[in-house]
Image (tube, rainbow, N blue to C red):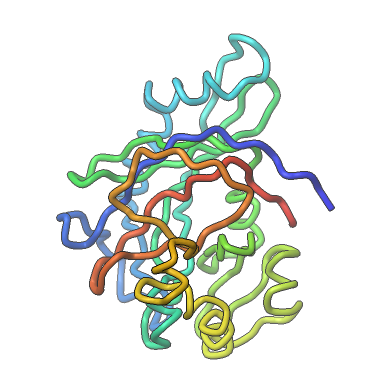
Amino acid sequence: MRRPKNVLLRCAAVLAAGLGFTFAAAGLADAAGPQPVAPTELSKATNAARSSEALSLLGKAGGTAKAAASVVRDTQPIYALNPAFVRDASAPVATFWYAATTAAQGGRTLTVFTTPDATGAWHAVNVASGNTEARMVSAAAGALVFTEPQVGAWYALSGTQVRPLNQSAVKSIGARPITVTAYQELVSQRYSDKLPGSQYNENGVAGGYDTTASTTVRSTKHYFLPIAGSAGVLALGILMMARRRYND
């Protein structure tokens, strides 16, 4: 088993649909998939990943002292398992989580996370070691990439099939693609008792968090299922992790 790699933390809330920011679709999204992030928004994300804010985060990433950071211009949208899908098979499988841009500094490969604020302005919110997102996007071969962070699994969503992209995903669903219907049944069994309103949640131990608590740094070895606090709110908070697991 590979050892987890450390992550540098900064966190921010991402948007609810009602806060005034929407991702324009290049076309109708797949029935099982989310609305795609518009190219214009990804361009803003790239600019944010190259901003002074991002460079400041990269400067705190350690490595070779005073090494200049370089940030590529290829930014990828990253999606996460949609809490609404856990309860309702007709909901999109995943929702937008953050944009990932690969960077390099002092011989190390890093990834800059960016998200939009309530006004639609994009900001760098985290720097993580490695380039997991870029590798998962490459492995997906054009399919939509999403993660089930509770178990560290990465998947490719294509049409009505979910395909595993790393070993955690193989452990989760098996080595072969499964249908979206089968995946929904799986995550429903896995998480339905941990969503808002459940006893698990009322006890304060649910795998989610309050999206309004945007600046609380939490240190944990676990992955938490992003939870939207109310119906109709299409938003996820950036996951606050102290460690990032690589099982691919």
- Residue 112, horizontal then vertical, whole percent: 50, 37
Q: Quadrant of the C terminus?
A: bottom right
- Image quarter of residue 22: bottom left
Residue at position x 54%, y 69% in the image: 143
- Image quarter of residue 48: top left
- Residue 242, horizontal then vertical, whole percent: 58, 40
136 over 182 or under it: above or below = above
Residue at position x 34%, y 68% in the image: 35
Residue 75 vs residue 88, the one in the foreground = 88
Task: Say whether residue 94 is left or right of residue 178.
Answer: left
- Image quarter of residue 47: top left
Residue furthest top as drawn: 66
- Residue 241, horizontal then vertical, whole percent: 54, 45
180 over 13 or under it: above or below = below
Residue furthest front as drawn: 203
Q: How many marks?
A: 0
Residue 65 vs residue 201, the one in the foreground = 201
Residue 79 vs residue 231, the one in the foreground = 231
Residue at position x 26%, y 44% in the image: 117
66 over 154 or under it: above or below = above
Residue at position x 47%, y 72% in the image: 200
- Residue 6, horizontal then vertical, whole percent: 65, 36
